[in-house]
Amino acid sequence: MNEFDFIRQLRDQTRSRKTSPRLIRGIGDDAAILREYPGRDLVISTDLLVEGADFHRDTTTPRLLGHRALAVSLSDIAAMGARPLWALISIGLPESAWESNFKDEFFAGYLALADRYGVTLAGGDISKSQSIVIDSIVIGEVNAGRAVLRSTAKPGDQIFVTGTLGGAAAGLKLIELGARLSIDSRRQEADGRSEFDSDTSDDNAIQSLLLRQLSPQPRVGWGVVLGEEHLATSMIDLSDGLSSDLRHLCEESNAGGTIDAASLTLDEDVKHLCGRRALDPLALALHGGEDFELLFTVAPENISRLPKRVDGTPVSRIGEITGQTGVVRIREQNREWDLPARGFQHFSN
């Protein structure tokens, strides 16, 4: 049993129990939806980051970790087409982290990102623990009945993705190979920037990819536009990898999907380094995960209304939803084959 098998089992168990009529959507999406009052719904997401499984202290900084803790939850709210408003965070720290400046730097990174999107830290909890454990909760709002679900894609809908793919997974691979943030990168992080100016040097490409992994940028603006303008018929954020997350969306929608390999927007830094660093851009884009881009579908008649960019981030059409339930395929020129779900899984079987 892997984590997704267990989640499905838990969802089945909750269906047979009495629930509040104000719960609009529970287990099975990027966030839960609760009816707040007539005309408005609350969207609530929670994420757990555990030292040793989700991050390592020697490969990041406290400020970047604070940024990441909020970013992953903001991405879930964006994937529901909602606007984030409030946050709660609980953190367990070992004595060594508590006695250092870790907590101050962590919350400096966390609050800087919160300020960027107008999110208020409303509470949380702190406890002593053997390793660092972070529980991040973000609450957003959306017009009643307008949250974008995973389960509402229709055959013929076109599949889009924001930004570029494969950069975060490449950054993780580089970290595993021993790459670390430079002093310049740490200064850049303190200035609130997450990408280097255009430069084709190997060193800059490596540092940029490390920041793609350690300092993800949630597509909050795209989420709000897609939700408020009623453009997306379904949506999910790319945390586990395109091959896995597209399958999640298709399974929830009782549909299938076909991806055009030539349409995938691959990270330029990955393409630059691929020959010298054993990086496969297509494999990283399909299976790597943690890009925290938004994968969404649009009805053909609404494609002309889709903005070219939001907050400087473009979108690309990469495929189409089909009527073959659970069948996800990839096409390259005249060849077409099944796309297996090879994204990250906790407790992989």
Image (cartoon, rainbow, N blue to C red):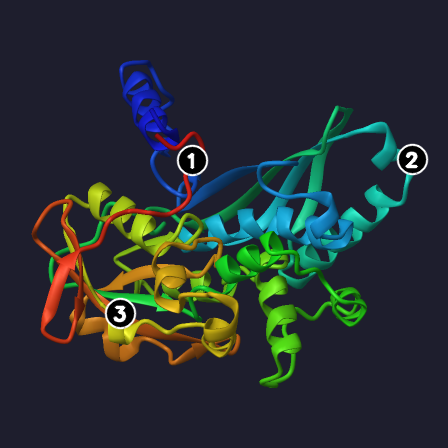
Residue 44: x, y in percent? 49, 39
Query: Does 331 sit above or below residue 62?
Result: below
Q: Which residue is pictured at 62% across the width and 60% down the height?
A: 117
Q: Secondary structure at mark 3?
A: strand
Bin the neighbour count of mark 2 within 10 Å (Cα to Cα): few under 14, some 14-19, many 20 and up: few
Residue 46: x, y in percent? 53, 37
Q: Secondary structure at mark 2?
A: helix
Q: Which residue is pictured at 63% across the width and 36% down the height?
A: 52
Give the label on residue 318, or none.
Answer: 3
Quarter of the image where the C terminus is located: top left
Inspect the image, locate mark 2, and give the three-letter code of the amino acid beneath it: Glu
Q: Residue furthest bottom?
A: 199
Do tag 1 and tag 2 residues touch (Cβ < 8 Å)? no
Bin the neighbour count of mark 3 within 10 Å (Cα to Cα): few under 14, some 14-19, many 20 and up: some
Q: Secondary structure at mark 1?
A: strand
Q: CA distance from mark 1 to mark 2?
A: 39 Å
Q: Nearer the viewer, mark 1 or mark 3?
A: 3
Inspect the image, locate mark 1, and give the three-letter code of the amino acid beneath it: Leu
* Of pointers 1 and 3, the one earlier in the residue sequence: 1
Query: Does 17 sit above or below residue 207?
Result: above
- Is 2 or 324 nearer to us in this picture? 2
Q: Is residue 166 left or right of residue 118?
A: left
Give the label on residue 34, or none.
Answer: 1
Q: Which residue is pictured at 54% across the width and 38% down the height?
A: 47
Q: CA distance from mark 3 to mark 2?
A: 49 Å
Q: Residue furthest top?
A: 17
* Residue, disc 2: 99
* Of pointers 3 and 2, the one earlier in the residue sequence: 2
Q: Nearer the viewer, mark 1 or mark 2?
A: 2
Query: Does 111 sit above or below residue 228?
Result: above
